Amino acid sequence: MKNDLEPSLILRAYESIIRHGTQTERGKIYQGVEAYSDYDGYNVYLKSNGVELSVGFHNTYHFNYEQSHNKDSFIAKIALLAK
């Protein structure tokens, strides 16, 4: 399996959303990407336009999506948010 993203990039994007975002029911949203974590903070989630990315313990991650073009645009958003 090819690695699409570096875990550190994902976590920088998550921190950016949490820092600058607007409160939602689950977490915060910033520039169209929602970020939230589970109750213990071991797993974090990023969600936008039909794509959900979960990052777990030991920096493992998993994408859930139906259309690959949505995944591609999601990855581009995450990269911008991580800067």
Image (cartoon, rainbow, N blue to C red):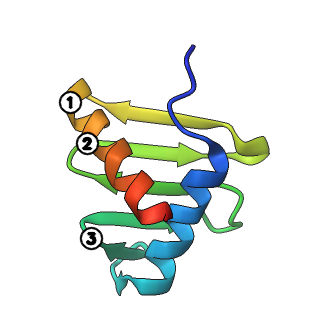
From the viewer's side, name the closer residue of 8 and 48. Answer: 8
Q: Quadrant of residue 53?
A: top left
> CB under 8 Å between callouts 2 and 1?
yes
Tell me which amino acid carries mark 2: Ser
Q: Is residue 37 visible?
A: no
Mark 1 is surrounded, within 10 Å at the Cα level, by few (under 14), some (14 to 19) or many (20 or more) other residues, namely few
Query: Residue at position x 25%, y 25% from top?
Result: 68
- Look at the numbered discs 1 and 3 and tell me whether their residues touch, using CB distance below 8 Å: no
Q: Amino acid at mark 3?
A: Gln
Tell me the number on the disc at residue 69: 1
Residue 37 location in percent, x, y? Answer: 56, 64
Is residue 73 or residue 61 the one in the foreground?
A: 73
Q: Residue beneath label 2, please? A: 73
- Where 53 sits versus 28, above or below? above
Label 3 crowd (10 A; few <14 / some 14-19 / many >=20): few
Which residue in the protein does label 3 denote? 31
Image-quadrant location for residue 73: top left
Q: CA distance from mark 2 to mark 3?
A: 13 Å
Distance CA(mark 1)–CA(mark 3)? 18 Å
Q: Nearer the viewer, residue 53 or 24?
A: 53
